[in-house]
């Protein structure tokens, strides 16, 4: 069995028992972490000197739409609802090959930036072959992925071979028959619930019961107040359902979620960028015992990688804490609960909480014996690691440029700042060729964002 021994590293384990270690070693046996501590030896292991490196758990992107990787940066200047008029309609012009190119290139870029676990909320499934292309793309990339099959058919078009909601159950069951969904499996299956409205509660109940019958986790775009309350009234609220965004959740929504030990996933950069969302749910949820996880959401706007999400959440919450202090007339001084988060909390959101949110928290997100060897090596050899809590370096002083190596299930996916077995130049060409084919079908070109003005129009 393959063994790897990292020597002399600084380790941020995100594990209470292991803690933080200086000049320590990690022994990997197969796909798992076997031992952690100083002075480890194994004559059969490949020894890697990690002096000057900070090793942390692999990061989890718990909500993104990877098919939009084709349109990298297209909606950078979008405002208000312009994302929805510019991006989702393009889904109808995709072929299964285009889906493969988008998923594969997005997964590779995510790993390059330190993401080892990803949840793809897949709203570009027009026929079974699109789902099959997605499965193949994830397998070829080597990332740890949860394929979230959209039941709501968000981008449904006239040519779709499968309709929404229950019409999609057979294809989901077909996939489930080939995807074991074990905690250590690199590919897992989930479903993305339809939009929850007062007149669609029965549909929501059928979808949740279906998901539990085939034993797959669930998520949905939680974009209105009272949705968590509605699921709870149906007697179906559980930790296997992950709300995404949740910007308009009520205090009761969050109390219910916290009472069951639930999580929510925030895509802080995209939500803040949108200019129309409240961000109070993060602190309110945290105070109710809800575990916060992170995601990137929209690759057509946001860089694929969780590091920017950590930084903007940390800074944003401190800014909002300051607003509260001024409005309430408090002196600007530290007191219990203010500021809301320390850098260590934010790193936990990106790692351990991400694993928990996806139902595999006992498998990934921490560095401890028995956990999967999903690791990121941050290179401090050029400029050094920040003093004090290593979480401060990760959140505020580091970036994807320092991601030297990435390991998923004991296998290097990136090493010495280069992807392993992947030519990134070819990945770019694959993505751009698919993008250009879609643009030709749509009748547009790169960078051509259609702006929508209030009360007047641009020619």
Image: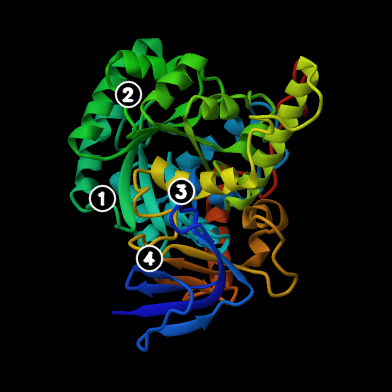
Which labelled disc corresponds to residue 352? 3
Secondary element under disc 4, as helix, strand or loop, is loop
Question: How far across and down, in percent of the image, does residue 331 sit?
Answer: 81, 24
Relative placement, left or right, of 446 versus 144 is right
The mark nearer the N terminus, 2 or 1, is 1
How many residues crowd mark 2 within 10 Å: few (<14), some (14–19), many (20+)?
A: some
Residue tagged by mark 4? 409
2 and 1 marks in contact (CB < 8 Å): no
The mark nearer the N terminus, 4 or 1, is 1
Q: Between tags 4 and 1, which lies in front?
A: 4
Which quadrant holds residue 332?
A: top right
Q: Between tags 1 and 3, which lies in front?
A: 3
Q: In which quarter of the image is the C terminus?
A: top right
How many residues crowd mark 1 within 10 Å: few (<14), some (14–19), many (20+)?
A: some
Which is more toward the observer, 175 or 126? 175
Q: Which residue is drawn at 25% across and 34% down?
A: 211
Residue tagged by mark 1? 181
């Amino acid at each position: 069995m393959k063994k790897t021994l990292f020597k002399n590293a600084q380790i941020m384990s995100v594990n209470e028992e292991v803690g933080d270690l200086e000049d320590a070693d990690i022994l990997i046996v197969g796909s798992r972490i076997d031992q952690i501590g100083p002075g480890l030896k194994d004559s059969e292991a490949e020894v890697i000197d990690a002096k000057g490196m900070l090793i942390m758990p692999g990061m989890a992107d718990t909500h993104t739409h990877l098919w939009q990787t084709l349109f990298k940066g297209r909606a950078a200047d979008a405002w208000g609802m312009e994302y929805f008029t510019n991006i989702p309609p393009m889904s109808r012009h995709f072929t299964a090959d285009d889906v493969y190119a988008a998923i594969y290139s997005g997964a590779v870029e995510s790993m390059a930036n330190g993401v080892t676990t990803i949840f793809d909320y897949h709203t570009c499934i027009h026929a079974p072959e699109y789902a099959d292309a997605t499965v193949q793309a994830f397998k070829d990339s080597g990332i740890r992925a949860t394929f979230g099959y959209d039941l709501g058919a968000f981008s449904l078009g006239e040519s779709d071979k499968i309709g929404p909601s229950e019409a999609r159950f057979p294809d989901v069951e077909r996939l489930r028959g080939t995807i074991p969904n074990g905690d250590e499996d690199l590919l897992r299956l989930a479903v993305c619930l339809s939009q929850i409205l007062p007149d669609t509660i029965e549909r929501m109940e059928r979808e949740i019961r279906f998901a539990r019958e085939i034993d797959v986790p669930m998520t949905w775009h939680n974009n209105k107040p009272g949705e968590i309350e509605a699921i709870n009234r149906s007697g179906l609220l559980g930790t296997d359902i992950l709300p995404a965004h949740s910007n308009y959740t009520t205090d009761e929504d969050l109390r219910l979620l916290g009472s069951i030990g639930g999580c929510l996933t925030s895509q802080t950069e995209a939500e803040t960028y949108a200019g129309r969302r409240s961000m109070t749910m993060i602190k309110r949820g945290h105070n109710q015992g809800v575990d916060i996880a992170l995601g990137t959401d929209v690759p057509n706007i946001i860089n694929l990688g969780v590091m920017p999400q950590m930084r903007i959440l940390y800074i944003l919450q401190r800014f909002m804490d300051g607003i509260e202090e001024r409005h309430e007339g408090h002196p600007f001084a530290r007191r219990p609960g203010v500021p809301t988060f320390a850098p260590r909390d934010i790193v936990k959101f990106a790692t351990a909480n991400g694993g928990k949110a996806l139902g595999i928290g006992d498998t990934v997100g921490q560095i401890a014996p028995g956990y999967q060897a999903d690791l990121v090596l941050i290179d401090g050899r050029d400029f050094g690691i920040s003093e004090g809590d290593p979480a401060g370096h990760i959140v505020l002083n580091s970036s994807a440029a320092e991601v030297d190596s990435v390991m998923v299930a004991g296998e290097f996916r990136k090493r010495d700042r280069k992807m392993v077995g992947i030519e990134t130049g070819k990945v770019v060409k694959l993505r751009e060729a698919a993008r250009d084919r879609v643009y030709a079908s749509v009748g547009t070109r790169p960078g051509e964002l259609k702006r929508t003005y209030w009360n007047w129009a641009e020619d």
